[in-house]
Image (cartoon, rainbow, N blue to C red):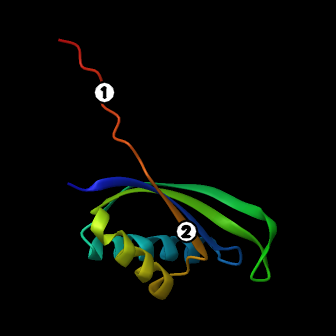
Amino acid sequence: MKTLYEGLFIFPEMLEEEQLDQSIEAVKTELEKLNGTLESSTRLGKRSFARPMHKKKAGIYVVMMFRLDGDRMDAFKRRLKLATDVFRAQFIKKEEVETAQEA
């Protein structure tokens, strides 16, 4: 069974809207290559860093909810470094929320 993850992706601040769309699509493509599925994507916009990282002062933050087999997570992280414009990424394993159904 695939695990639900929340990923915080930081893209370079210099990306235009169209380039950001392409970068998000590249992340989705890499996810699909590993049989994962993208549940949702939320753009949080451009945010300044608390301190400069690699001579960069800000980035564009995007939160993505996706499903992926846990044993493929390391492969996904490696693919992100090689094939996308992702500056940084952080992942959290989310617990499934069951909805109460009335009988």
Q: Residue at x 70, y 69 (%)?
A: 59
Inspect the image, locate mark 1, and give the three-letter code of the amino acid beneath it: Thr
Dot 1, how many residues are within 10 Å of its Cα: few (below 14), some (14-19), or many (20+)? few
Q: Position of residue 48 (x, y in %)?
A: 78, 63
SS at circle 2: strand
Locate residue 67 relative to residue 62 in the image: left or right.
left
Q: Residue 89 bears which disc, if any?
A: 2
Q: Position of residue 33 (x, y in %)?
A: 28, 77
Front residue of this view, candidates 58 and 98? 98
Q: Residue furthest top?
A: 103
Dot 2, how many residues are within 10 Å of its Cα: few (below 14), some (14-19), or many (20+)? some
Locate residue 47 relative to residue 67 in the image: left or right.
right
Q: Give the quadrant of the C terminus.
A: top left
Q: Residue at x 44, y 75 (%)?
A: 77
Q: Position of residue 84 (x, y in %)?
A: 49, 82
Q: Residue at x 48, y 70 (%)?
A: 24
Q: Give the quadrant of the N terminus.
A: bottom left
Q: Position of residue 88 (x, y in %)?
A: 59, 72
Q: Quadrant of residue 10?
A: bottom right
SS at circle 1: loop
Which residue carries the number 1 mark? 99
| Image mark count | 2
First of labels 1, 2 by sequence position: 2
Q: Residue at x 62, y 62 (%)?
A: 61
Q: Are marks 1 and 2 in contact (CB under 8 Å)?
A: no
Q: Quadrant of residue 78?
A: bottom left
92 relative to 76, above or below: above
Mark 1 → mark 2, Cα distance in angstroms: 30 Å
Inspect the image, locate mark 2, and give the three-letter code of the amino acid beneath it: Ala
